Image (cartoon, rainbow, N blue to C red):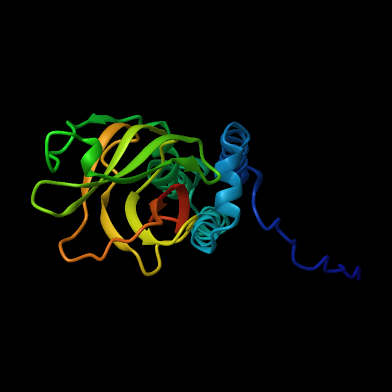
Amino acid sequence: MLLRRDAGPVRSLPLRPSALVVPVLAGIGGAAFFAWKPGVARSMLGSPRALGFSLVVAGLVLGMGWLLPRLGRGPWLTAGAQLVPVLAAFVLTVLPAFREVTVTEAFPDTVGASTEAARVGNGALEGIDHRASGTALLLRVADGSYVVRLQGIDIEPGPDYQVHLVEGPDREDPGGGVHLDRLRGNKGSQNYDVPAGTDVRTPVTVLVWCRAFAVPVAAATVR
């Protein structure tokens, strides 16, 4: 009688080749995006929130590529499911980097006839791992309150930009500062009211902050 030797269970690859198509293409696209915007790449590498978001997306894509074929799902359904988190990440993080918005507002009503009389201070807007130019003005308006005017700005676009006024020079985080509003346009000139009762003493920093990934985008020290 012949004895048949059992070859044992056949081990399958962690991911089938068809399940690697979407991760590879997403990786190539991400590398191309960061090569085009190296400052954004440096900014994201310094952001735990951005790194965590990237790891969650990668985990979902690879996890579905491993699980769905083992549940009998075909390569097209698997690829479609993998595309969902990739497209969500694209809409939330990459697409805003292409969205240019110009908002131009009139100079606010100032104290007296001369705008110079109402100017408390000003400073040049500079990018922090992002491209940025323009001027930040601190103005005292007719009712005695303060307005921050971003004038002639051109800021590299991105997701969820917010404007803060932070005590002290060269600040790169909004801690202890006052939130003014979302950035209404990455180009043009806009006015941002300082909340009533805020004790404004120069030097102060006008900070454009990416709330989505908790990183600074641009800042101007007003003296």
Residue appearing at x 79%, y 68% in the figure: 8
Residue 45's x, y, as percent? 60, 54
Relative to 132, say whether 207 is above or below: below
Quarter holding residue 12: bottom right
The residue lying toward the viewer, choosing from 115 and 152, is 115
Relative to 111, is 104 on the left or the right?
A: right
| Foreground of the two, 89 or 184 | 184
Return the residue nearer the eye: 203 or 174. 203
* Residue 179 place in picture, x, y as percent: 28, 59
In terms of depth relative to the viewer, which is nearer, 115 or 184?
115
Q: What residue is at 54 percent from the left and 59 percent from the top?
A: 47
Eyeballing the image, is 57 above or below 87? Answer: below
Q: Where does residue 101 sit, x and y in percent of width and height? A: 30, 30
Q: Residue at x 49, y 62 (%)?
A: 49
Q: Position of residue 132 (x, y in %)?
A: 46, 36
Q: Quadrant of residue 202?
A: bottom left
Look at the image and tell me in which quarter the N terminus lies: bottom right
